[in-house]
């Protein structure tokens, strides 16, 4: 069995993590958190979302956060963008990379973005056209790829078709989101085998929420399929307020522990990452739930 030699971790804690918190974290704390993450060796840190503050009040300080963080050379700081309005705000803040998002579930599309899948693709088309003019890189997310809280089962073919559309529109990579963590290794294998018939592994990433403790084993299956970009959130933060059952992302600490054990390089200093996780967990007063394990100390 062969695995990738290197894995790129996309740290989504500041965005996916904090979007779901009822505690509104002060801007200065978010900035300190992201600066701590920047010092760990991570090469991608998803920083915030330029979504409507009415929909995600926890990230209403998006512009201030983005403009206040230290931008470490060699690290990218993408932000989530749902529409042209969000793109314009991101551009004004001098963002260099964005992520767009849609889903193969009509119901989830309505709940999460108040529009149909077709309308979300129209929005994405507009955003990507504007991004291209401004030399801004675009990553694409697909949510609920292994099951939806409203629609139930999702067909791997529907995921594949939508992923192909996003690539044709100009996304350089598609992150496959198991938003509510219902994926199992068997289901993950079937999805990946279907999608890999059309899209090469270097254009795919995986994004597992850990609702049923399946995230790491699903990532293992993705590694077996040559996928080498994995999203995770320090301290297991995360979730989507518009998807019942969307609990935390796989913890970056656990992911790195597994990858280190497999001899796969990430370039991330686990001790520094744990310190960043402790910092934000303390701020959220969630120390007891934090994924900081004595074995890592
Ligand atoms: P809407 O209410 O239909 O939008 O929401 P609208 O166009 O009718 O506008 C309503 C108001 O919002 C207006 O303001 C707009 O100006 C404003 P008003 O006139 O009432 O004062 N507005 C905005 N303001 C700031 N930035 C914007 C923006 N857009 C409109 N970009 C909308 C549509 C898409 C905006 C909304 O549904 C939304 O923001 N949804 C985002 C929800 C979200 O962030 N969900 C979580 C992220 S996805 C996720 O977590 C999954 C992922 O992690 C992968 C996985 O796990 O699967 C990525
Ligand atoms: Mg997510």
Image: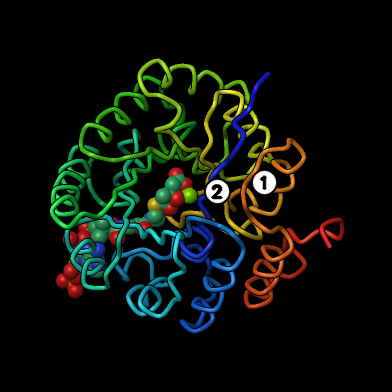
Secondary structure beneath disc 2? strand
What numbered label is drawn on residue 255?
1
Considering only order in the chain, which callout, 1 or 2, is on the residue closer to the N terminus?
2
Between disc 2 and disc 1, the foreground one is 2
Q: In the rendered image, which residue does mark 2 sit on?
A: 9
Horizontal and vertical percent position of residue 90: 26, 66
Horizontal and vertical percent position of residue 75: 46, 60
Work out how far the residue at label 2 is from the one at label 1, CA to CA, in angstroms: 9 Å
The quadrant in which the C terminus is found is bottom right
Horizontal and vertical percent position of residue 167: 27, 33
Q: Can residue 243 be seen in this view?
A: no
Q: Residue at x 68, y 18 (%)?
A: 1
Q: Residue at x 54, y 75 (%)?
A: 23
Occupied quadrant, residue 83: bottom left
Q: Which residue is drawn at 29% across and 48% down?
A: 138
Binning the other alpha carbons within 10 Å of mark 1 as few (below 14), some (14 to 19) or many (20 upward) gives many
Quick one: 177 or 10, which is closer to the camera? 10
What numbered label is drawn on residue 228?
none
Occupied quadrant, residue 5: top right
């Amino acid at each position: 069995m062969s695995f990738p030699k290197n894995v790129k971790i996309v740290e989504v804690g500041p965005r996916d993590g904090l979007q779901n918190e009822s505690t509104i974290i002060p801007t200065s704390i978010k900035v300190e958190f992201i600066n701590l993450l920047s010092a760990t060796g991570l090469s991608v840190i998803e920083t915030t979302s330029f979504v409507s503050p009415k929909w995600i009040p926890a990230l209403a300080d998006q512009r201030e956060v983005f403009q206040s963080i230290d931008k470490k050379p060699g690290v990218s700081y993408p932000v989530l963008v749902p529409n042209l309005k969000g793109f314009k705000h991101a551009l004004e803040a001098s963002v260099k990379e964005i992520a767009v998002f849609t889903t193969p579930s009509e119901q989830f599309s309505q709940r999460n973005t108040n529009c149909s899948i077709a309308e979300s693709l129209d929005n994405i088309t507009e955003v990507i056209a504007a991004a291209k003019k401004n030399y801004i890189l675009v990553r694409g997310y697909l949510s609920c790829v292994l099951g939806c809280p409203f629609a139930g089962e999702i067909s791997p073919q529907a995921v594949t078709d939508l992923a192909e559309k996003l690539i044709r529109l100009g996304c350089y990579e598609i992150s496959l989101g198991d938003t509510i963590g219902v994926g199992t290794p068997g289901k993950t294998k079937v999805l990946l085998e279907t999608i890999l018939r059309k899209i090469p592994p270097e254009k795919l990433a995986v994004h597992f929420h850990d609702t049923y403790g399946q995230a790491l084993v699903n990532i293992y299956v993705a590694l077996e399929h040559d996928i080498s970009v994995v999203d995770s959130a320090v301290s297991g933060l995360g979730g989507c307020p518009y998807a019942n059952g969307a609990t935390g992302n796989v913890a970056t600490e656990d992911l790195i522990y597994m990858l280190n054990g497999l001899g796969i390089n990430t370039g991330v200093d686990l001790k520094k990452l744990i310190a960043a996780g402790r910092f934000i967990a303390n701020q959220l007063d969630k120390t007891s739930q934090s994924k900081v394990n004595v074995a890592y100390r």
